[in-house]
Image (tube, grey):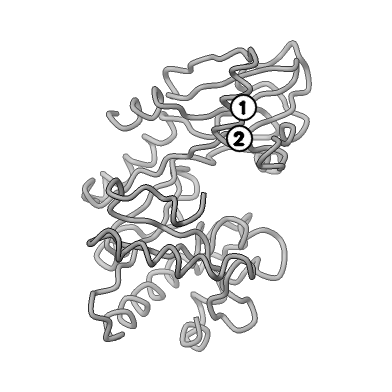
Amino acid sequence: MTPEKIPLGYYTHINFAFVLIDPDTFTLAPMNGDVASLYTRVTALKALQPGLQVWISVGGWAMNDPGPSHTTFSDLAASGDAQDNFFQEYPVADDRGGKAADKENFVKFLQNLRHTLDQSGMPERPGLSITIPSSYWYLRGFDIVKIDPIIDFFNIMTYDIHGTWDSSVKSIGAIAQAHTNLTEIDLAMQLLWRNNIDPARVVLGLGFYGRSFTMKSSSCLAPGCPFEEGGKAGPCTNTKGILSATEIRKVVADGATVTLDSTAAVKIITWDDDQWVSYDDAETMKTKQVS
C-alpha cells in the first residue's frame, strides 16, 4: 500500500515505522534509500485530514539484533553527548543488547528528549510516546511510574511474545507457543494497573500477521510441542517464521486446520503435516479489546 492509498477518516494517529539511529553519529537515519521519500508523503496526508497526527517510530526490534547497532540504545541513553546528536524497545534486556543501567538512563533520556521537544519552537507541541512489551519479563525493565508523566501515552505490543527466538531462551526453549496470548498480556496489564497507570493512556497494539514454525513431528502439533525452525516463507513476505494476514487467509482457504484457543484468545492453524502459525483475526481481536 502506498501512502496515498491509506484510507482517511478512520485514524487519529499514524505511526511510521521505522527510522533508525546511526550507531556512529547517533543521528536519525532512514531504514534505506527507498524509504526516505515516504516520510514526506505520509506527512502530506495531514493536509487531507485536518487533525491527523503523524508520528515517527524510532528503532524497532531489528536495531537490537546482533550487529553494529546492538548496543546503540544503551549507548545513547547513557551519553549526554550522544543525545545532543540523537530509542529502546526493551531496556535492560541483555538478550536485546540492554544493560542494567538502562532502566534509570532511559528515564533521564526521555526527560531530556521531552525538554528538547518542548523547546523546539514548533507550532504544535510535539508528541512523545514509547512502546512497551506485553511480556512481563521485559516490561520489568521499564520504570513506568517515572516515565508516565513524561510521555503522552504508552503503546503496548500484544504480539511477538513468542517466536523462533525462544529457542535461545533457557527457560522456554524451542517449543511452539502463540505469539499473542491474552493470559500473558493480562499479566503485563496488571503491572500497569498496580502502578496506577491510567488505562486511557495505554494504546493496545494488535498484530495483523502471524508467527510460524516448522514442527519437529507431525504427531505433535499442539502448543508446547517442539519446533525445528521458522515456518516456510510466504510468497509475499518471503521470510521464514512470519506470514501476513493475506497469506494466512490463503492457507485457510486451501483447507488448513483452524483451532481457536479461547483462553489465549488466538487462532492456530496447522497444514502440510509440519506447518504451524498463530495469529489474530476479527474474532480474537474483539475478545482482546473487551477483556
Q: Is residue 46 left or right of residue 264?
A: left
Residue 222, x across and y down, in percent: 63, 16
Q: Which residue is mark 1?
A: 277
Q: Position of residue 215 (x, y in %)?
A: 74, 24
> Which one is in front, 10 or 150?
10
Element at label 2: strand
The kind of residue tagged 1 is Val
Dot 1 and dot 2 residues touching (CB under 8 Å)? yes
User: Is residue 49 shown left or right of residue 243?
Assistant: left
Q: Which mark is residue 211?
A: 2
Q: Nearer the viewer, residue 226 or 276?
A: 276
Q: Amino acid at mark 2?
A: Arg
Q: Can residue 170 be seen from the camera position used here?
A: no
- Residue 36 x %, y %: 56, 70
Res 207 visible: yes
**Circle 1 SS class:** strand
